[in-house]
Each structure stands twice: as C-alpha cells, then as structure tokens.
Image: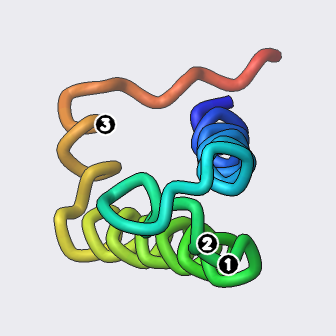
C-alpha cells in the first residue's frame, strides 16, 4: 500500500506542478520524474530486499537458531 501512495503522490505532485506552472525547486524535480523510472527503482528495491533477506536467512542460520531446543513432533501411531 505504501508503494501505491508513493506513486500516487508523485503523480499528484506532477499534475500540481504542471497546473501551477512550477518550474524550479523540489516540486518541479518530483513532478519531472518519469514514472517508468520510479517503477524500475521500486522493482529494484524489492529485488534487493529479497536478496538481503535470502542472505540473512542463509548465512545467519535463522532456522537453526529458531529451532534449537525444539523437539520433533512425534509420529502419530
């Protein structure tokens, strides 16, 4: 949902910058962003987040630390 809010805010600022003829400053810069570029950045962030999470899981041995001390479930007879 946060991603949709960011995309919506960029689009809203873009429209406001056009309608109010804002040509300089941060609003003009945000208004000039290409949404295709923003989409690629978001996909890259998701991919990077996935790679970091995978590395933490693999090299941090999260499952081993979490399951230490737990007894395996006994098979039902």
Disc 3 to disc 2, C-alpha distance: 40 Å
Q: Is residue 9 above or below residue 27?
A: above
Q: Spatial distance from mark 3 to mark 1, Cα to Cα?
A: 47 Å
The percent position of residue 66, horizontal first and vertical second, equals 26, 36
Q: Residue at x 47, y 67 (%)?
A: 23
Q: Closer to the camera: disc 3 or disc 1?
A: 1
Disc 1: which residue: 34
- Foreground of the two, 63 or 77: 63
- Residue lying farthest top? 77
Q: Nearer the viewer, mark 3 or mark 2?
A: 2
> Closer to the camera, 3 or 70?
3
Query: Furthest residue to the right?
Result: 77
Which of discs 2 and 1 lies nearer the camera? The answer is 1
Question: Residue placed at 82% from the left, 16% from the top?
Answer: 77
Q: For the residues marked 2 and 1, what is the alpha-carbon distance in whole angstroms?
A: 6 Å
Q: Along the line of sight, which residue is nearer the eye, 77 or 11?
A: 11
């Amino acid at each position: 949902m946060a991603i949709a809010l960011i995309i919506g805010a960029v689009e809203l600022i873009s429209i406001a910058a056009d309608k109010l003829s804002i040509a300089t400053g941060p609003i003009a810069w945000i208004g000039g962003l290409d949404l295709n570029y923003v989409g690629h950045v978001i996909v890259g962030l998701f991919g990077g987040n996935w790679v970091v999470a995978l590395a933490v899981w693999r090299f941090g041995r999260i499952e081993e630390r979490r399951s230490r001390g737990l007894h395996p479930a006994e098979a039902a007879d």
